[in-house]
Image (cartoon, helix red, strand yellow):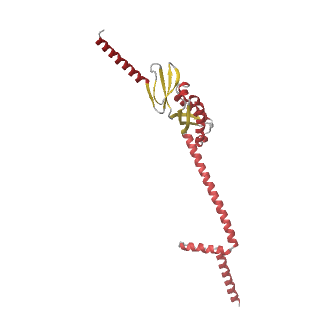
């Protein structure tokens, strides 16, 4: 081999090696965001967690499984639930979860999001099926906390933290809606009657107290009668009112005048 050919071959070899190294580096360099982690496997065996930032792997021997550490909003589809008092309702909810241990999320469950979703559906039916309809409508906060604790304990082995559960909607049948409306109307009617009765009772007590005061002080009753006459005159009504006391006094005056007149005639 001549020297010129050797130099050409050597240049080609160097260029090839540079290209191989460049391709290797391109395949070996990995970059993960701050909220990402990668579970690393070498020849199928778990060897550790990588990230965040830049790192190198062996592109031939190593494989990575990325895990997002941000909170995931999991929409639980509507579930048909029969409550303890035999009422059929449709309930859907929202589950907020995040991965706290990427190792368990990859090694201990196949699809942690699907598994959590199915577990949330089952737990929702089980918990709400043990409650009555009134509790389902009025104690949502308590039910949310109870479901969240159950899911959190069940998914802890998968490296998942369930931070919150919210029952979003409760759909009732039309017959039940009409029954609830009638019940609410009856409750409002009962309250109005109780309020009216309380008002009548308080008014009766005040009127009895006023009657006792008028009985003990006739002058006050007389002033009240004169005030009533003044109010009637102010309204210009064509009504003549003769209070009881005034009528009695007028009768006494007329009787006295009649007796005097009879005595005059007898003389």
Residue 71: x percent and y percent? 51, 35
Q: Is residue 30 left or right of residue 104?
A: left
Residue 52: x percent and y percent? 48, 31
Q: Residue at x 65, y 74 (%)?
A: 220
Q: How many marks?
A: 0
* Screen quadrant of the C terminus: bottom right
* Screen quadrant of the N terminus: top left
Residue 213: x percent and y percent? 68, 70
Q: Is residue 9 left or right of residue 61?
A: left
Does any portion of residue 128 appear in the rendered image?
no
Please tell me in which quadrant of the rendered image residue 231 appears.
bottom right
In the figure, 258 relative to 212: above or below? below
Q: Is residue 68 left or right of residue 198?
A: left
Does any portion of residue 260 appear in the rendered image?
yes
Please tell me in which quadrant of the rendered image residue 241 appears.
bottom right
Residue that protrudes farthest toward the front in the picture: 3
Who is closer to the viewer here, 29 or 193? Answer: 29
In the figure, 172 relative to 214: above or below? above
Residue that protrudes farthest toward the bottom in the picture: 267
Who is closer to the viewer here, 76 or 130? Answer: 76
């Amino acid at each position: 081999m001549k020297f010129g050919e050797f130099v050409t071959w050597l240049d080609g070899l160097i260029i090839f090696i540079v290209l191989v190294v460049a391709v290797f580096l391109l395949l070996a360099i990995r970059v993960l965001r701050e909220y990402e982690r990668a579970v690393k496997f070498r020849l199928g065996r778990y060897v550790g967690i990588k990230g965040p930032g830049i790192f190198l792997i062996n592109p031939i021997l190593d494989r990575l499984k990325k895990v997002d550490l941000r909170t995931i909003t999991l929409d639980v589809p509507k579930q048909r639930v029969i409550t303890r008092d035999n009422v059929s309702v449709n309930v859907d909810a929202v589950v907020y979860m995040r991965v706290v241990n990427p190792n368990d999320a990859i090694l201990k469950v196949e699809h942690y999001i699907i598994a959590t979703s199915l577990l949330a559906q089952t737990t929702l039916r089980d918990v709400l099926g043990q409650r009555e309809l009134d509790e389902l409508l009025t104690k949502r906060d308590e039910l949310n906390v109870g479901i969240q604790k159950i899911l959190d304990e069940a998914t802890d082995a998968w490296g998942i933290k369930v931070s919150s559960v919210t029952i979003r909607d409760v759909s009732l049948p039309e017959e039940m809606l009409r029954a609830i409306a009638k019940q609410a109307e009856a409750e409002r009617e009962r309250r109005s009657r109780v309020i009216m009765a309380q008002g009548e009772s308080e008014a009766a007590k005040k009127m009895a107290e006023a009657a006792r005061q008028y009985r003990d002080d006739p002058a006050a009753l007389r002033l009240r009668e004169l005030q009533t006459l003044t109010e009637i005159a102010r309204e210009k009504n064509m009504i003549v009112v003769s209070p009881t006391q005034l009528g009695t006094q007028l009768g006494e005056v007329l009787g006295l005048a009649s007796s005097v007149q009879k005595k005059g005639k007898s003389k």
